[in-house]
Image: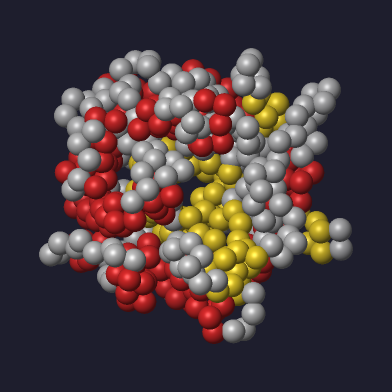
């Protein structure tokens, strides 16, 4: 039996995203987002599901904050729907949209919960997509305009800001693989988008500093761990490329002011031309206050000629899998966090997402999601190991507070520690909720 103890100052929380939980897509002046369009395009989302209602948190935010209060968390990560603030992406401001977020933030603060606000969690205004989306550099300026409005509007209320959630997903998953909105399959386009996101991030951080906003700002990339199948150099190199697609490609420009040369050369071999304008890298290379890390899974991989983009092939090494089919790989959590610290220094880190998909349903009012409890315990042990190894962890926010619209998977995949009945919208606290509540209250848990 062992006790896994965390520091008293550690922040504990939970996370959500606007399009996944809010619903009310046509209420109070909200404009269309690319996810409204994508989810209503036949064949893009399982069962033709969409976020029109989702968890209806737009109307039920007080109930959801009461759930957080019961959970005992000190921090809640939410995102703002850009088209709820600027229905056309820029120009006229929708006061009703601002009012909703003021009400939410006020409710959080009244209950002793620190708001951590993500400015962009994928719901780009459709009006901007119609003009080229993130491939059009005008979108960068529109984003900075939106961010500045939010900074001024919530000065003194919101003290933790994230510019972009998972830029890899916004760029490569959405514009090269095509699984998410807007659904293109063009490597050059995806690389352009990735760069423009980083420029927008840097310009936003500069604006934050110039405005003298009280608080901290960072961004939240998603990472995986790619473990080489053998010590053969070709396996090591293949895994390095696959991992750098998530890590170095989005970290080096921010922390070092340049793209990783070995990846630039690899992309050039694939026909990609980097479109970097004068001053871009200096703009991206702004000091940030913290780094958000989203981690769910990892894998073992090996070299395989002409396999995927990086001559890299995943190997099924027999790991347990969650209901979405992702490996349960807590060792990768420890490895990726220590790797990031070795490479970029002891930057303050918040785990902004970590969680698992188990589709357990209520039985007499009880949701016995033991798989999720095991997952959380295993990953918190890895987190504790990383902290003891010098990783500067400031907080841990589990994904997700609520079952919700799981993007291209629709409502078929459940990540919440609270079950949502999508017909009645009834919330039911799962066993994992109570396990996490006890861990938050104690600051430790017991491994038997």
Is 84 located above or below residue 414 in the figure? above
Q: Is any part of residue 266 visible from this angle?
A: yes
Residue lying at the far left of the rendered structure: 278
Q: Is any part of residue 348 visible from this angle?
A: no
Q: From the viewer's side, name the closer residue of 382 and 442.
A: 382
Left or right: 378 as drawn, with respect to 131: right
Q: From the viewer's side, name the closer residue of 74 and 326.
A: 326
Residue, x 51% and y 37% (percent of image)? 408
Residue lying at the far front of the rendered structure: 306
Residue, x 43% and y 50% (percent of image)? 177
- Residue 372, quarter of picture: top right
Is 447 located above or below residue 417 in the figure? below
Q: From the viewer's side, name the closer residue of 422 and 211.
A: 422
Q: Position of residue 316 (x, y in %)?
A: 69, 62
Q: Position of residue 98 (x, y in %)?
A: 32, 26
Residue, x 42% and y 27% (percent of image)? 41
Residue, x 67% and y 56% (percent of image)? 327
Q: Position of residue 387 (x, y in %)?
A: 60, 68
Q: From the viewer's side, name the closer residue of 209 and 200.
A: 200
- Residue 2, quarter of picture: bottom right
Left or right: 123 as drawn, with respect to 384: left
Left or right: 267 as drawn, with respect to 428: left
Is 437 located above or below residue 261 in the figure? above
Left or right: 221 as drawn, with respect to 280: right
Q: Position of residue 273 (x, y in %)?
A: 24, 64
Question: Split into 4 quadrants, where in the image is the C terminus?
Answer: bottom right
């Amino acid at each position: 039996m062992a006790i896994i103890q965390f520091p008293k100052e550690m922040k504990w929380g939970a996370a959500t995203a606007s399009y996944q939980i809010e619903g009310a897509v046509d209420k109070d002046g909200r404009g269309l987002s690319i996810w409204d369009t994508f989810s209503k395009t036949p064949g893009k989302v399982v069962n033709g599901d969409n976020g029109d209602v989702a968890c209806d948190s737009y109307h039920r935010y007080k109930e959801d904050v009461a759930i957080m209060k019961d959970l005992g968390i000190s921090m809640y990560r939410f995102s703002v729907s850009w088209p709820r603030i600027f229905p056309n992406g820029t120009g006229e401001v929708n006061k009703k949209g601002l009012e909703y977020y003021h009400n939410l933030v006020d409710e959080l603060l009244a209950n002793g919960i620190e708001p951590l606000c993500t400015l962009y969690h994928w719901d780009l205004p459709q009006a901007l997509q119609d003009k080229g989306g993130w491939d059009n550099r005008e979108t960068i300026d529109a984003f900075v305009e939106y961010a500045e409005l939010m900074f001024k509007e919530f000065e003194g209320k919101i003290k933790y800001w994230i510019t972009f959630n998972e830029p890899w997903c916004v760029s490569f998953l959405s514009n090269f693989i095509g699984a998410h909105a807007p659904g293109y399959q063009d490597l050059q386009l995806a690389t352009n988008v990735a760069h423009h996101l980083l420029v927008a991030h840097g310009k936003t951080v500069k604006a934050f500093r110039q405005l003298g906003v009280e608080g901290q700002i960072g961004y939240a990339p998603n990472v995986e761990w790619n473990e080489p199948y053998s010590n053969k150099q070709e396996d090591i190199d293949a895994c390095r490329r696959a991992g750098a697609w998530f890590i170095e490609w989005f970290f080096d420009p921010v922390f070092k002011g340049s793209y990783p040369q070995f990846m630039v050369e690899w992309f050039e071999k694939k026909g990609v031309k980097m479109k970097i304008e004068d001053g871009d890298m200096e703009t991206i290379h702004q000091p940030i206050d913290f780094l958000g890390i989203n981690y769910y899974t990892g894998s073992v991989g090996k070299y395989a000629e002409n396999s995927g983009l990086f001559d890299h092939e995943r190997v099924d090494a027999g790991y347990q899998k969650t209901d979405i089919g992702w490996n349960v790989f807590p060792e990768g959590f420890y490895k990726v966090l220590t790797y990031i610290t070795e490479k970029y220094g002891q930057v303050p880190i918040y785990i902004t997402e970590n969680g698992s998909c188990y589709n357990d349903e209520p039985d007499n009012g009880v949701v016995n999601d033991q798989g999720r409890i095991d997952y959380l315990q295993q990953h918190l042990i890895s987190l504790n190991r990383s902290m003891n190894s010098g990783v500067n962890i400031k907080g841990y926010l589990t994904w997700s507070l609520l079952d919700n619209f799981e993007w291209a998977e629709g409502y078929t995949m459940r990540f919440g520690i609270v079950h949502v009945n999508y017909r009645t919208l009834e919330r039911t606290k799962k066993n994992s909720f109570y396990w996490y509540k006890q861990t938050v209250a104690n600051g430790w848990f017991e491994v038997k």
